[in-house]
Amino acid sequence: MIGTLAPVTIRQRAGTYALTPASGVSLTAIAEHQALLRGSGIDWGCGTGCLAIVAAKISAVEAVVGLDSSELDVRVAAENAAVNGVDGKTTFLHADSYHPNTRQGREALVMLRGKVDFVLANPPASRGDDGFSFRREVLTGAREFLKGEAVVLVQISIQYSQKRIDLLTQIPGFRYAGCLATTPWVPFDQDRSDLRQHLVDYAAEEWRGGLDYTFGDPRNCGRTFIDARTALDLFRQTGMSPLSQWQVHLFRYERGSSG
């Protein structure tokens, strides 16, 4: 059961993680803040469709379009929507960000320009930079589709730091409206190969002179903070994973605003 919404059944494709802290907190944010969602929405990077499907369960939501770069995930998402009885309110498109890979998909998305009430996003970390590029891309690309007053709910874990979140408000039209949901301190699990690589990448970004990251110190249950370089050294010396909090943040969009 997700909040007060009806139960959902989500089938994951082989080789992917089931309910992660990131997806769990995203579902919690939708369930606890249903009043924010109405009309038409986009689920950016929809994966196997859980956010779009839960949003489609909200009576005020009329339609949700899911976008994902994995053609297999798009097919699984459509199957999950049918199992959960919301296939009539959801569409899933194979796309690179906001750019569908088929003519039919492009035509469908063009019809949404200036008509979208909300965007949901649980992006992965990007590679080769500070890990935050997909979050910036979610907001930048959304501007083409959002109505004059709309909302974006985006998962941003605490290690990225408030400074990076604040910089998102430099994207024209957006105003930061706070954190909607958060997990407690949980391990940034270094037994997961993807999170282990992310920590290496974050430390490299700090060594290049980028903004520091913010992890909870596992030696005192997160009562103090450590940066990525310290977290990586600590893991290599002790095997202790640093701590993080997965969170969903709200951005309000006003067309014509300078941000």
Image (spheres, rainbow, N blue to C red):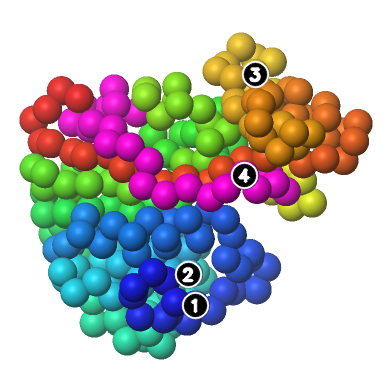
Position of residue 9 relative to residue 214, above or below, is below
Mark 2 is surrounded, within 10 Å at the Cα level, by few (under 14), some (14 to 19) or many (20 or more) other residues, namely many
Residue 48's tag is: 2
Q: CA distance from mark 2 to mark 4?
A: 26 Å
**Amino acid type, label 2:** Thr
Instruction: Give SS at disc 1.
Output: loop
Residue 186 colored in magenta in the image: yes
Residue 99 is situated, as x and y percent measured from the top left of the image, at 32, 51
Q: Earlier in the sequence, mark 2 or mark 1?
A: 1
List the residue tagged with mark 1: 10
Q: Earlier in the sequence, mark 2 or mark 4?
A: 2
Q: CA distance from mark 3 to mark 4?
A: 22 Å
**Amino acid type, label 4:** Trp
Dot in front, 2 or 1: 1
Q: Earlier in the sequence, mark 3 or mark 1?
A: 1
Write the residue at 42% across / 60% down.
Answer: 28
Dot in front, 1 or 4: 4
Q: CA distance from mark 2 to mark 1?
A: 7 Å
User: What is the span of residues highlighted in magenta in the rendered image?
Assistant: 168-189
Write the residue at 34% across / 73% down.
Answer: 4
Residue 45 is situated, as x and y percent measured from the top left of the image, at 43, 56
**Amino acid type, label 3:** Glu
Q: Earlier in the sequence, mark 2 or mark 3?
A: 2
**Amino acid type, label 1:** Ile
Dot in front, 2 or 4: 4
- Whether pointer 2 and pointer 4 mark residues with C-beta atoms closer than 8 Å, the reply is no
Dot in front, 3 or 4: 4
Residue 206's tag is: 3
Of 108 and 142, nearer the camera is 142
- Which corner quadrant holds the N terminus? bottom left
